[in-house]
Amino acid sequence: MAITLNIDPMIEARFRERANAAGLSIDAYIERLVDEDQSTLDELERLALDGLNSGEPIESGPGYWEQKHRRLEERLGRTAPK
């Protein structure tokens, strides 16, 4: 199924240049971009689900972030050049 898209001529020129450099037709180049975009979305979803399933949830109120900042400052203080 062919689709016609109207895009800015400068963007089209960049697509054509990159497609030619990759040895692809403009259609194949855009298809590759769409496939890579979908792969990126799939990977982000997988990582988000991994994070959600990584363990017990924790409360992250103001005290949690204060403690995180204090620990980070302590670590930076130990590793900072003197």
Image (cartoon, rainbow, N blue to C red):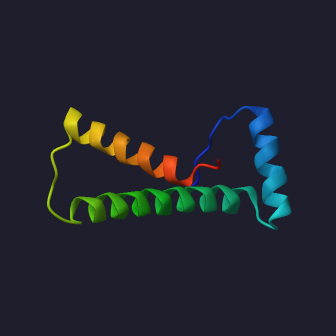
Residue 71 lies, in percent from the top left, at 36, 48
Image height check: is 76 above or below 49? Answer: above
Q: Is residue 1 visible?
A: no
| Residue 74 image position (x, y, % from top left) | 42, 47
The answer to whether residue 67 is above or below residue 31 is above
Q: Quadrant of residue 29?
A: bottom right
Q: Nearer the viewer, residue 51 or 78?
A: 78
The answer to whether 75 appears left or right of 21 in the picture is left
Q: Nearer the viewer, residue 33 or 68?
A: 68
- In the image, taking residue 14 as reference, residue 79 lies left or right, namely left
Question: In the shown orientation, is residue 61 left or right of residue 37?
Answer: left
- Residue 24 appears at what percent x and percent y? 77, 65
Q: Residue 72 placed where, x, y %? A: 42, 47
Q: How many marks?
A: 0
Q: Nearer the viewer, residue 40 or 57?
A: 57
Q: Residue at x 23, y 41 (%)?
A: 64
Taking the view exactly as shown, the residue that stands out farthest to the front is: 82
Going 78% across and 34% down the picture, which residue do you hit? 9
Look at 62% across and 43% down and name the residue there: 4
In the rendered image, is residue 77 in sight? Answer: yes
Q: Residue at x 41, y 57 (%)?
A: 44
Classify 74 as above or below 37.
above
In front: 57, or 76? 76
| Quadrant assignment, res 49 | bottom left
